[in-house]
Image: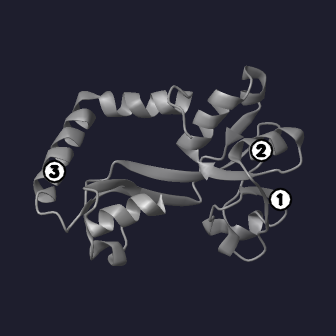
Amino acid sequence: MEEAYEEARTGAAHASMVWSYTPERDEFFLFSDVIIVSDSVLFHLKETHFDWSSNSDLEKYIIGGTLGYRYSIEDWPGNKIERVPTDTQNFAKLLAGRIQLFPSDMYAGYALLNQEMSAHDRNRVTHHPKPYDRTPYSVIFSKKRPENRDFLKQFNDGLAKLKTSGRYNAILESQQRGDFAIK
């Protein structure tokens, strides 16, 4: 991912996806309209009667995490993350009762559950409806390439057509079902 970012920053590539806006990135990139808003949620077993409204509500739970990922909830006092190499391993730990919560992007989490877990196991897992983080993502276009202003307009026009036609929502639903592999 860092390589794709760097290639777009230097102009070696026209664009890269998906990135959130930061003032530092604004110096180098044109940002497309938002292509997806990522809701980071807490997955748990349906049998676990879990609710939360503040950070202190999470302190009593064992939270799983994936090596190399950064979770905003780990900055909250009292939260500790037990890490393993993959999201799949975290869902396995959740199903085995070795962790009680697993933070993940909602769409990516359900796509992985649908791709990797049995129907029985999938039906045991849910997520809390309150996201702990919400991040809008865009395609970034290098400012080093003048033609990218036209490409950005074409991209935004196409994205708007997808959303108006209903195809955009169909793609998101398809991803959540696991129709697209996330690797």
Q: Residues within 10 Å of mark 3 (few under 14, many from 20)?
A: some
The C terminus lies in quadrant = top right
Identity, as a three-letter code, of the amino acid under mark 3: Phe
Q: Residue at x 73, y 57 (%)?
A: 65
* Front one among 55 and 18: 18
Direction from residue 107 to residue 49 in the image, left or right: right
The residue under label 2 is: 89
Left/right placement of residue 51 relative to residue 182 reads right
- Look at 32% across and 53% down and name the residue there: 34
Asked if residue 27 is positioned above or below residue 88 in the image, the reply reads below
Distance from disc 2 to disc 3, alpha carbons, whole Å, reads: 40 Å
Which of the 4 image quadrants contains residue 25? Answer: bottom left
Q: Amino acid at mark 2?
A: Gln
Camera sees residue 20: no
* CB within 8 Å, label 1 to label 2: no
Q: Nearer the viewer, mark 1 or mark 2?
A: 2
Mark 2 Cα-neighbour bin, 10 Å: few <14, some 14–19, many ≥20: some
Find residue 18 and name its label.
none
Relative vertical location of residue 168 with respect to residue 100 in this rendering, above or below: above
On the image, numbered disc 3 is attached to which residue?
151
